[in-house]
Every structure is written in structure tokens, then in C-alpha cells.
Amino acid sequence: MLTSLAWSLGLGLALEVSCAPSVPQALRRQSANNFTSYTIPPLESSSSSSVRASAIKVKADTFLYGPSIAGNTSFWPTGSLGNSTVNADFAALSTDTPIDVPNVEADAAVVTSTIAAAGGLKQLSDYNLLYKDQWKKSLPDGVDVGVLTNYTNDLFFSMERLSVNPFSIKRLDASATLPFQVDNGITTNITGTTVSGLLKSGNLFYVDHRDQATLESTGRFAAYCDAYFYIHPTSGDFLPLAIRTNTGSNLIYTPADTANDWLLAKMMFNLNDFWHSQWYHLSATHNVLEIIWEAAYRTLSDEHPVMALLKRYVVSIRIFGYRVSAITDLINTGGFIDQSFAFTGAAAGVSTTKFYQSGEAGNFQSNYFYRNLQNRGLYNNTFGPKIKSFPFLEDASVIHTSIQSVMTTFVDSYYTSPSSFQQDSELQAWIAEAKPAQIMDFPTSVDRQTLIDILTQFAYLGSAAHQTLNTNDLAEIKGTLPFHPASLYSAVPETKGVTDLMPFLPPANASVQQLILLGLFARPTFVNSNVSLSQMFNDTTMLGKMPTKIADASATFEKEMLAQSKVVAARSFDKDGLSQGMPFIWRTLDPQRAPYYLTV
Ligand SMILES: *[C@@H]1O[C@H](CO)[C@@H](O)[C@H](O)[C@H]1NC(C)=O
Ligand SMILES: *[C@@H]1O[C@H](CO)[C@@H](O)[C@H](O)[C@H]1NC(C)=O
Ligand SMILES: *[C@@H]1O[C@H](CO)[C@@H](O)[C@H](O)[C@H]1NC(C)=O
Ligand SMILES: *[C@@H]1O[C@H](CO)[C@@H](O)[C@H](O)[C@H]1NC(C)=O
Ligand SMILES: *[C@@H]1O[C@H](CO)[C@@H](O)[C@H](O)[C@H]1NC(C)=O
Ligand SMILES: *[C@@H]1O[C@H](CO)[C@@H](O)[C@H](O)[C@H]1NC(C)=O
Ligand SMILES: *[C@@H]1O[C@H](CO)[C@@H](O)[C@H](O)[C@H]1NC(C)=O
Ligand SMILES: *[C@@H]1O[C@H](CO)[C@@H](O)[C@H](O)[C@H]1NC(C)=O
Ligand SMILES: *[C@@H]1O[C@H](CO)[C@@H](O)[C@H](O)[C@H]1NC(C)=O
Ligand SMILES: [Fe+2]
């Protein structure tokens, strides 16, 4: 019964991988144990040098760069070792950290019968049926507090831009041409000044999803929104000003519209922003880390401490399994994306490619944590007021700082003089390898700070950045209904004055299907486990082959992350009903809830 429900929903147990060949363990997993400490390469004259060099050559000869899959982004491994690594990762994905299909199915059966018993979803408030006492097994801690009660609050919508998906918004520079006009009278009523006034004072922010107009449609509906947000000149609150649909009669909505019209506009924007967040995530975290790893693997010995560190994030995460599962179950024809979204799985590949190749997601150095925010006028801006409350910066910076501190100890432990970077031929080869690997915007030379930065960004992308965009955040807030529909079910209105939002929103079966997909990413077993972010460096085998200072730094990291976990877990609403300035309690970057690595 449960299974047949899942089939009828099109779930089809799709993520239970059945087609992966059984392959011998990849070389990288066998090699680890017959040396007692990681070392930077010996001088070329020493006898062990040639042994080490020939082991690297075996890897470089058999782990090759092949054509990209799941979009045209970074090279995908090929060659005998490349292929066996991909196959082993894909096979391991289903056994290492299994996605909880049975629990999600069982939960879906319960919610389906609950909705049926209630007579279906007939009005907006009925979407609460999707959550009240539901998803007990797959999302035991429920959705974020405030999600069900406060989503119509404008601050909920605007503050999602500074937390749930902080990668689509930018501050407009005073010299920018206004992307669109909003009636001066309306704008002045809302903000106390005009759009130009907001622009000139550095208070105007913009998100642009117009490019989604060119994506292949599933036949369901979507607008292609661009939108203004602003810092209120007197309250300092970060709020929404206007949403333009860029389709049909190209309506521009504002908070001055009727409650229904404005809510629909925000939902149409959310649809586009959710799409952005997911393909940006694939591109900016998975695809970037994959190619850096590939280049490292072909140039660094398995005895190199940097290789050991990268393996901590990469081997345990089966990094080359995800793109295969994406083309098998997610973006394939008839897959999860086709089933729920307004744009097809093929369109997902198009968006991923665009984010990667434009550099928006694919560039390495310009997307360093602070630089990425600074480039978009969100951090250390010299122009316009500081953002009063920036939850993503607040939470991610704590993690970033602690990672950076471990990486500093790590680099200083192995590289004791400025010349030691130059003398490490493997490290030099890795940096040079960026060219044939076509790693975009990778450093072209390496010193102490460069290496600390590379390693910090690698770990940050795989942990805090990935978690913000994906994993349990999807089910907890990013894709919650009715505020975040993956598709519209009626065409975008040509005129204002919509009286009933229900025809636009996913019907019951489609809502359950959307939540099934999110539920598969929820991973409740990761919470407080040995894969939680606080455990990032806590690998006794790895640490045992490194100087004790690094183990000490790892213990400090864990202590800092456990303290931060307490901070996040203790969050509640203040007297205004806000947490971090938001009408919901955001738990995503709790280091005991987030995993330390990329996952689904
Ligand atoms: C590791 O052990 C294998 C076989 O046991 C041997 O062939 C290889 O040379 C050893 N590697 C090193 C670096 O000692
Ligand atoms: C992928 O992108 C690269 C770089 O822009 C281009 O050279 C190549 O032809 C593209 N491959 C495909 C299959 O479109
Ligand atoms: C690796 O896999 C690719 C794609 O399936 C295939 O074309 C290639 O021949 C394989 N290479 C080896 C050495 O097995
Ligand atoms: C501005 O607000 C006032 C008072 O609510 C209202 O009468 C007026 O029509 C509004 N102006 C515009 C252009 O919406
Ligand atoms: C941000 O600005 C402050 C103050 O000007 C400065 O101390 C800090 O180094 C800057 N941070 C970054 C990451 O650039
Ligand atoms: C939901 O039901 C409608 C009408 O029966 C059907 O056309 C649609 O395919 C179903 N959607 C899903 C996601 O199962
Ligand atoms: C976590 O612990 C489980 C056993 O509880 C073990 O099988 C697994 O390998 C560990 N994972 C990591 C990454 O340490
Ligand atoms: C590291 O992991 C082990 C095993 O999972 C655990 O017992 C220990 O508390 C963790 N932390 C430290 C600092 O060792
Ligand atoms: C948000 O919802 C909670 C109840 O879940 C409530 O206590 C709080 O006041 C709400 N905040 C706002 C701003 O409405
Ligand atoms: Fe992911």
C-alpha cells in the first residue's frame, strides 16, 4: 500500500540505486594505511621521492578529465580510475548515507489520507494539513517555527533573501540604471521616498530572475520575476518593495496591492528564487569542489596532508555520486524535477550551466565567503547603510572563522618557512593543474595565505554554503507550502484583483509530491551525529598521522561549534515576534544539525 502510493505519486523508489555495477574499492581508499604520517614531498634526490612520484603518475594516467554531465560545468572523471571512482561513489551513496525512502513514503501515506479525510485542500489555511502532526519520521523536528503562522508577513519574505537563499540578491549601485520604475506615489507611500531616492542613498536592492523566461516549461506555469527590496530609511528594516512578472501584461506588484495579489506575487517570486537556489547550489558547491578535488587527486600523493584533508570532505561524502544520481533520478525526463517544477529537468541543466560558466557560481576566488557578499554590496559596503540584521552572515561567519583557524594551524604545521611552499612540488603541481582542469578563477601561485584561503573556502563551500542552500533547509523552510510552490497551476494573471489563490497553488497530490522530494533531502539522522558540522575534522585516523597541534585545533573547532549550536538551538522570538530580525526561527546553520559535507 505504501509502496503503491509512492509509485502512484511517481516516487518509484527512484533513489534506491539498482544499476550501479559492483566495483572494486577505488585505489584511493586502499592506499591510506601503510604510512604513519602525512608528509609534504621529500626532496627530489631522496629515494622515496621516485616511489611517491610514480604513485601520483598512476593516478594522473588513469583518472582523467572527461565531458561534464548534468549540465556543461566542470570536467567529469573518466579513464579507468576515474570511472571506477564514479561507480564506487554512486554505489556507496545508497548504502553509506541512505536516503530515507521508506520513512518518507510512510509519512506521505499518512498525510495523503489526512488530506483526503479532510475533503482536500479547499482554502489557503488547509495547507496546514500538510504539516500538523505530519512527517513524523522523515522530519521529526518539523518545519521552522513561524513558517506556518507568519509567512504572510513581509519581513518573512524579505529576510529569506538574507538567510534561506542569500545568493540571489545584490545592492544596486547609485550609478545603476533602474531596472524598472515603480509609481512614485506608491513608492513614497511605502518607503517615504522614491525608487530613485532609495537608489541614490544605497538603500535599494535587486534580484533578477528574468533569465528563467527562456527555460523549457513542463506545461505548468511560472512568472520570471525581478524584484526590488529596500532598507527602510527610518526603521532600518529590510523589506520588499516591488515584484515584476515579466510575462503577459508584465504586472508590477507592491505591498500596496490587495493582500491576495501581493501574496501571489511573493509566491511567484519564490518559485523563481527556489529554482535559482537549487541550480546555483549544484554549480557553486558540487561542481566547483569536484573539479578542485580532481586536480588535487591527479597531482598530490595520497601521503600529502592536503590530500588527506580534502579526502575528509570528499571520500566520506562520495562526491562523485551526486551528479550521477541527478541524471538518474532528478533531472532526467520524468524525474523529480519534471514532476514538480514549472521548468523541466533539462532546464535544470541549462540553469546549472549558466551559473557555472558565467562565473557567478563557477568562479573560485571571487566567491570567497566575504568577497562574494562584498561583491554584491551586502558586506563592508562603502555605499549605503549597513544591513541591520543579516542572519546568513551572522551564522556562517562563525563557522567560517572557526574553519579558517583550523586551516591556519594546518598550514603553519606543515609549511614552516615561506620557501616551503615553493619547495613542495606536489602543491605547485596542483596549482598549475588548475589550467588543464579549467578551474575558474583559481589562484595561480601559492603562499601561506593563499593556501589557507583555498582550504577554508573548500571546507566552507562543502559545509555552510551547501547546507544553506540544500539538505534539511529544503523541507524545513525553503520549499514549504503554500508559500513556496515549485509550480503555478494556473497561468500568471493578466490583471490584478485575484480573489482566490487556490487555482494557482499545487493541488493536494502535487503538494505531497513536492514535500516528498524535500523530505528525501531532510536527513534527520545526521543531526547530532558523527557527520554533523562540528565533527568536520574529527577523524582519529587522519589526525593520528598529523602533528598534534592539528588535533588540538580540531578539538577547539568542535568546542566552538558546539557552543554555536547552543546559540542557534536557544533562539526564540523577541517581543516583536522576531528572531534575528525574522518572523521565523532559522536553524539551518546549527553545526549539530548541518552535515560537514556536501550531500543530498
Ligand atoms: C605500501 O604497501 C604496499 C604493499 O603492502 C607497497 O607496495 C607500497 O610500496 C607501500 N607504500 C609505501 C609508500 O610505503
Ligand atoms: C561546454 O562548454 C565549453 C566551454 O564553454 C564548450 O567549449 C563546449 O563545447 C561545451 N560542450 C557542450 C557539449 O556543449
Ligand atoms: C570510462 O567511461 C566512459 C563513459 O562511460 C567511457 O567512454 C570510457 O571508455 C571509460 N574508460 C575506461 C578506461 O574505462
Ligand atoms: C498613498 O496613501 C494615501 C493614504 O493611504 C492614499 O490616499 C493614496 O491614494 C496613496 N497614493 C497612492 C499613489 O497610492
Ligand atoms: C571589513 O571591514 C572591516 C572594517 O573596515 C575590516 O576590518 C575587515 O577586515 C573587513 N573584512 C573583510 C573580510 O574584508
Ligand atoms: C495529480 O492529479 C492530477 C489529476 O488527477 C494528475 O493529472 C496529476 O498528474 C497528479 N499529479 C501528481 C504529481 O501526481
Ligand atoms: C559514523 O559512525 C558510523 C557508526 O556509528 C560509522 O559507520 C561511520 O563510518 C562514521 N562516519 C564517519 C564519517 O566517521
Ligand atoms: C570525536 O569523535 C569521537 C568518535 O565519534 C567522539 O567520541 C568524540 O567525542 C569526538 N570529539 C573529540 C574532540 O574527540
Ligand atoms: C511568528 O509566529 C510566532 C508563533 O509561531 C509568534 O509567536 C510570533 O509573534 C510571530 N511573529 C510575528 C512577527 O508575527
Ligand atoms: Fe547538494
Image (cartoon, rainbow, N blue to C red):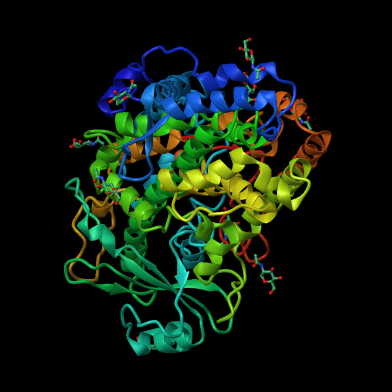
In the rendered structure, the answer to whether residue 378 lies left or right of residue 283 reads right
The quarter of the image holding the N terminus is: top left
Does 154 sit left or right of 355 as displayed? Answer: right
Please provide percent x and percent y for residue 105: 40, 25
Image coordinates for residue 46, horizontal then vertical, percent: 70, 28
Q: Which image quarter: residue 38?
A: top right
Front one among 360 and 197: 360
Q: Is residue 44 above or below residue 479?
A: above
Task: Name the residue rendered at 42%, 85% in the picture.
Answer: 175
Does residue 303 sit above or below 490 in this rendering? above
- Residue nearest the observer in this picture, 322 or 85: 85
Task: Mark yes or no: residue 480 visible.
Answer: no
x 36%, y 30%: residue: 324
Residue 446 in the image: above or below residue 519: below
Give left or right: position of 218 versus 533.
Answer: left
Ligand 7 shown in quarter? top right
Q: Position of residue 178 (x, y in %)?
A: 35, 81
Count of picture labels: 0
Asked where in the image residue 222 lies, by quadrant, the reply is bottom left
